[in-house]
Image (cartoon, rainbow, N blue to C red):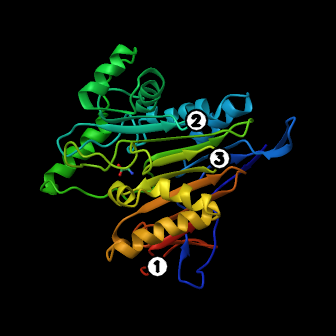
Amino acid sequence: MQRRNFLKKTGLGATGIVATPLLSSWKIAPQHITTEENTQSVIPLAVCTWNFENATAKAWEVLNSGGSALDAVEQGVMIEEADESNQTVGKGGRPDRDGNVTLDACIMDKDGNCGSVVYLQNIVHPVSVARKVMEETPHVMLAGKGAEQFAYEKGFQKENLLTERSKRDWLKWKEKSQYETIINIENHDTIGMLTIDKNGDIAGACTTSGMAYKVGGRVGDSPIVGAGLFIDNEIGGATATGVGEEVVKTVGSFLIVELMRQGKSPQEACEEAVNRIIAKNKNHDTFQVGFLAINKTGEVGSYCIHPGFSYRKYTEEGHTNNPSSSHYKAE
Ligand code: GLY
């Protein structure tokens, strides 16, 4: 097993695009399997957005013990959903502007089946409810109270998702906010995960508490199949993080898989999707959007725009201030 940190560092490219430490934490191990028809290279792989190493470690554990790509993505992202210190996913997530923690998630398997929940409250693991929607209903998406009721019927327990820390932060925000929605540009966000199992099959999941202090009822890209996540087992998969509205407008994950179908590498496809967002937004240096993609052979690509953590870029020396940096690339 080879374990690599996805936070690579490079300098400015000719185009002025800057490398970034956006997407991280992947595990990869080359293997070969032989079928009657052919011998093909298969690469079990677990990769996720951001630096959620415990999540990829869990997914890897599942894959390493022969588990399916689907089980691996579900169990991987569940780690972050249960982690109260992560304020962008699951329990402990930041609430909407009225103090309600509302969760969005989706999951997709090798056969193109998918399940999704939006605006789900009081349930720690929306990804598992999404999987139940996929596997135990004729539907793709359940929302709000209906999704919550469905979860209880499937045995999920009601739980308060608003931790003391997130409540304290929200109350502090309310003092000054005048109820403006803010864009979440902290150094962590939605977790999107893509896996390939020992059979070469691909699955993906995406889960989030959405934009901090959002307008009540707001849903982002994460539970929208094609936007926050898309898998085509013949081609590859893609997932997104960042400002969901921009991802939805671009149908970003579907776009990336289709670009890979046309011959682009995962890296080229992610860059194309981000560049389309840039082209449509004069204010692209004010928000963060990133994509992560894999293809069938286990190649990985990622790309994002980010206003920088107060305009920070990644260099060989480490983080330095750079007011002109707004595009970032992880290689
Ligand atoms: N990407 C997460 C959201 O916008 O809700």
Picture quarter with the C terminus? bottom right
Q: Amino acid at mark 2?
A: Asp
Q: Position of residue 21 (x, y in %)?
A: 55, 62
Amino acid at the residue labelled 1: Asn
Q: Is residue 265 above or below residue 206?
A: below
Question: Ligand 1: does it lie within 8 Å of the C-beta at label 2?
Answer: no
* Amino acid type of the residue that numbered disc 3 sits on in the rendered structure: Glu
- Mark 1, ligand 1, within 8 Å: the answer is no
**Picture residue at 65% right of the left edge, 46% below the top:** 234
Residue at which label 3 appears: 234
> What secondary structure is marked by label 2?
loop
**Residue 138 lies in what quarter of the image?**
top left
Q: Earlier in the sequence, mark 3 or mark 2?
A: 2
**Where does residue 173 sit, x and y in percent of width and height?**
21, 51
Mark 3, mark 1: which one is toward the viewer? 3
Q: CA distance from mark 3 to mark 2?
A: 10 Å
CB of mark 3 near ligand 1 (< 8 Å): no
Give the answer, above or below, for where 58 lies relative to 42: above
Quadrant showing the N terminus = top right
Name the spot of residue 238 as percent of width and height, x first. Answer: 54, 52
Residue sitting at x 32%, y 57%: 245
Residue 322: which disc? 1
- Residue to which mark 2 is pinned: 111
Q: Secondary structure at mark 1?
A: loop
For disc 1, the neighbor class at 10 Å (few under 14, some 14 to 19, many from 20) is: some
Looking at the image, is mark 2 or mark 1 earlier in the sequence?
2
Q: Determine the residue positioned at 26% across, 31% down.
A: 144
